[in-house]
Amino acid sequence: MKLTPERRAALTSWLEQRWYGRVRVPWYLLLLSLLYRIVNALRGLAYRLGLFHRARLPVPVLVIGNLTLGGTGKTPLTETLVRALISRGWKPGIVLRGYGGSERGPHRVQPADDAARVGDEAMLLARRTGVPVAVGADRAAAGLLLTEQAGVDLLVADDGLQHLRLVRDLEVLVIDGRRRYGNRRVLPAGPLREPLRRLQSLPLRVVNGGTPEQGEWPMQVQPVALRELDSGTRHPPEMLRGQRAHAVAGIGDPERFFLTLDELGVKLQRHPFPDHHAFRAEDFAFGDSHPVIVTEKDAVKLAGLTLPPKLLVLEVRIGVPTALIEQIDAALRQARRS
C-alpha cells in the first residue's frame, strides 16, 4: 500500500522521535533491527567471498555517503568537491541512484529530462555542475556508461556508501553535526544504515554544522541569495528579516533548512514534506500573500505547477577546508597511478 504524503510525514515524525529523542523504542523495531543487521552482514559476506560480483571501473571512484537515513548534505558536498576537482584538472562525472524518479537506468541525464524521471538530486547536480550525470539502480553500470560515452576520468558517486557492487578508491563520510548518529541503533530501531563499527574504515569524515570531533573536517552551509523562481532575480539572503514567510521543504532533514531561515531572521511558518516529495499546486495554497521559500533541490521539481507569485529559492554555498580538497585530490591521483 502506497502511503499518502501526510501519512509518510507522520511516520517519519514518529520514527525520528524514537531515533533522536528520548522516546522508548518498541520491541518490534528492535527485532526488525536485528533482522536488518543479519541480512546486511550476510550481504557483505557474500561480496567478500566473491559470491556477488563487484565491478571495478577504468577510472578512480570517489564515493560520498552517510551512515544515517535522511539528509546530511551529501549532494551539496558532491557539487562542491566536483567543482574543486575540475579546477585541479579532473574531468569528473557523477553517478547516483536517482531517488524520486522513475528511471531505473543506466541513463545519462539529458537537458530534456525532469525530476519525475531522473530524480531531484540528479537534476540539481546536472544543472549546477555542468558535468555528465548518470542515474541507475546499478551505480557501476551508470559509471561505465559515463566512461564510455562522456570521456570522464573520475567518477563521483553521490550516496553510494552502501552500494557494495561498486568498487571505490576513496570514501568520504558526511555526518549531521546537529543530530550525529541519534540513538546509535540500526534501522528501523534507529537511523543507522550500518553499525557504527563501519567508522573504522572511514577515516575521511566531514561534519555538516555543529562542532567537529577529533579527526573530522568541518563543512559550513552559507546562504548567499534569495532568488525569485520565475524571474531569476537574486536578492540578499537577509531580505526577509523580520517578515513572515512560508518555508516549504521536501528534503531529508527539513529542520536544517528551517533553522537556516531562522538564523536569517525570517518569521517562519514551517511546512515539512517527505524527502523527494512530488509537489502539487495545493501544497503551496496557504490562503495569504506571504512569500514562500523553498530549497534549491525542491525548486527543480516545480516546473509546470501553478505557484504563488512570491516564490523564492534559498541559494546556499558549501565551505570546506582547502586541505581536505588537497587530500582527496592526492588520494585520487595515487589511485589513478596504481
Image: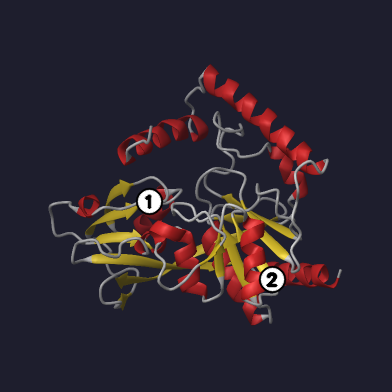
In this orientation, does residue 143 appear? yes
Residue contact at pointers 1 and 2, CB within 8 angstroms: no
In this orientation, does residue 322 appear? no
Quarter of the C terminus within the rendering: bottom right
Badge 1 element: loop
Asked which quadrant contains residue 69, the reply is: top right
| Residue 24 image position (x, y, % from top left) | 50, 22
Q: Give the Cα separation between the discs numbered 1 and 2.
A: 30 Å
- Please determine whether, in this image, residue 29 is positioned above or below residue 176: above
| Residue 204 image position (x, y, % from top left) | 71, 57
| Residue 65 image position (x, y, % from top left) | 62, 53
Task: Depth check: give the residue in front, 32 or 139.
Answer: 139
Q: Nearer the viewer, mark 1 or mark 2?
A: 2
Which residue bears the numbered disc 1?
250
- Please determine whether, in this image, residue 156 is positioned above or below residue 234: above
Badge 2 element: strand
**Residue at x-position 31% and y-position 75%:** 235
Which residue bears the numbered disc 2?
154
- Residue extending farthest to the top is 27
Callout 1 amino acid = Gly
Task: Depth check: give the residue in front, 107 or 317.
Answer: 107
| Residue 325 image position (x, y, % from top left) | 68, 70
**Residue at x-position 57% and y-position 52%:** 137
- Please determine whether, in this image, residue 82 is positioned above or below residue 293: below
